[in-house]
Amino acid sequence: MTTPQDFPPEFARQNKGPAILAICSTLTAVASIFVAARLYVRAKILSRVGLDDWLIILSMVCGYVTLGLNIAAVRAGNGRHFVLLTDEQKSGAIKWTMAGFCPGILSFGIPKLAVVALLTKITNPSRMHRIFLWCMSSGCLILLIGCVPLLYTQCTPSRSQWDFSVKGTCWSPWILIYYAIVVGSISGAVDLYLAIYPAVILYGLRINLKKKIALSCALGLGSVATAVAIYKSTRLPALGSRDFSYDTSDITIWTSIEGNSITIAACIPTLQPLLDLILGKAIFGSSGSRPKHAGYKSHNSGRTVELVTIGGSKGNRAPKQHKKMGVSDVTIGGKDSQESILSPRDQVYGDESTKFGQHV
């Protein structure tokens, strides 16, 4: 049996475990803050929690489960070189790392659905485009989940992967690796599309350039997840490494980065009312205006009136009364230049409107 003394000191000291714990814990904590802020805006300021919020909550729960399993894997020896571990440590590192893959995948797959739920409300796409967006995000999630059965069925019996007392037969790990690389690339492409789509719509609006850039950036932060997905795909061959506990540490870290970054990106566009409240003025509104909780919802005979619009488009007449509005709650379109964005004091221009965030 080998011991750390049988290897060079610098090799024996190498341990990515602390990095796994530090990075994953920190990012999960930061994502939790953004999710909590989002829920405060929706539940307290706007008094409306939607499907996208529940999806974000579900993805955050998956993030917590992933973090817990990552901690268990590190305690078992994950992050250290495989040859330095005892058989018990090797078994634990493999078992808990594999267990963390499924919730880890869900943690960056489910937020795509939340982003689509948000975009379909604020951009009012055509029926066919709406179907395309949902099919694209749902199909991507299904493909991502497909990695899980491949992972657990690559050896028969599956338990033989981490229980060395069980004999088993396995196919080439490159089947899973190639599949994961392809699906990871598709996931990155979906993130990129969901980031570019709202920016393209905003580009065609005749509004203040500063507002256009700010909104495009807020709604397009998912592009960060694209870069993360691309880089993570380059680390996937580690799934077939003989130094499993050390080499797969990068996959663990980048899975956490991807999941938390897309969750944070999905929350940022919804936080403008909270920022207005903290700063004491509407960022995109009239100077000196002091927003209150009620500033994002006005009641008329017990019903809520839409306060934030940007003109209109043919075929969708703006109703006089809507549900509560908030960040990204704008109505886009119009024949004239419209700049009434995200401000309770902004007025409605034009006779018609296409919703851009009616229920956000």
Image: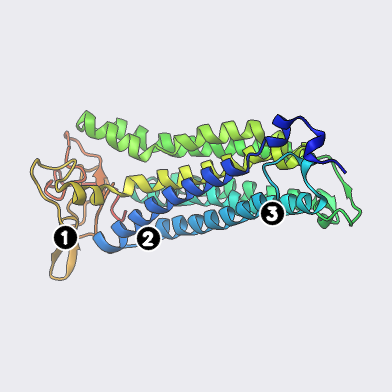
Counting from the top left corner in percent of width and height, residue 242 is at: 80, 37
Q: Nearer the viewer, mark 1 or mark 3?
A: 3
Closer to the chain start, of discs 2 and 1, is 2
Q: Name the outermost residue toward the bottom.
A: 302
Side of 288 relative to 22 (left or right): left
For label 3, the SS is: helix
Q: Does residue 71 lie above or below 5 as drawn? A: below
Residue sitting nearer the eye, 246 or 264: 246
Q: Which mark is residue 96?
A: 3
- Asked which secondary structure carries label 1, the reply is helix
Write the residue at 26% across / 33% down: 212
Residue 323 falls in image quadrant: bottom left
**Residue 160: percent from the left, percent from the top?**
85, 54
Nearer to the camera, 184 or 335: 184
- Give the numbered dot on residue 50: 2
Reply above or below: 237 against 151: above
The crowd level at tag 3 (other Cα within 10 Å; few <14, some 14-19, many 20+) is: many
Q: Are marks 2 and 3 in contact (CB under 8 Å)?
A: no
Q: Quadrant of the N terminus?
A: top right
Q: Residue furthest left?
A: 288
Badge number at residue 294 = 1
Inspect the image, locate mark 1, and give the three-letter code of the amino acid beneath it.
Ala
Q: Residues within 10 Å of mark 2 (few under 14, many from 20)?
A: some
Q: Position of residue 266 (x, y in %)?
A: 41, 46
Q: Tell me, yes or no, whether the two marked residues, 1 and 3, touch with CB atoms within 8 Å.
A: no
- What number is the disc on residue 241? none
Q: Nearer the viewer, mark 2 or mark 1?
A: 1
As shown in the figure, which amino acid type bears the numbered disc 3? Trp
Up-down relation of residue 186 to residue 113 (above or below): above
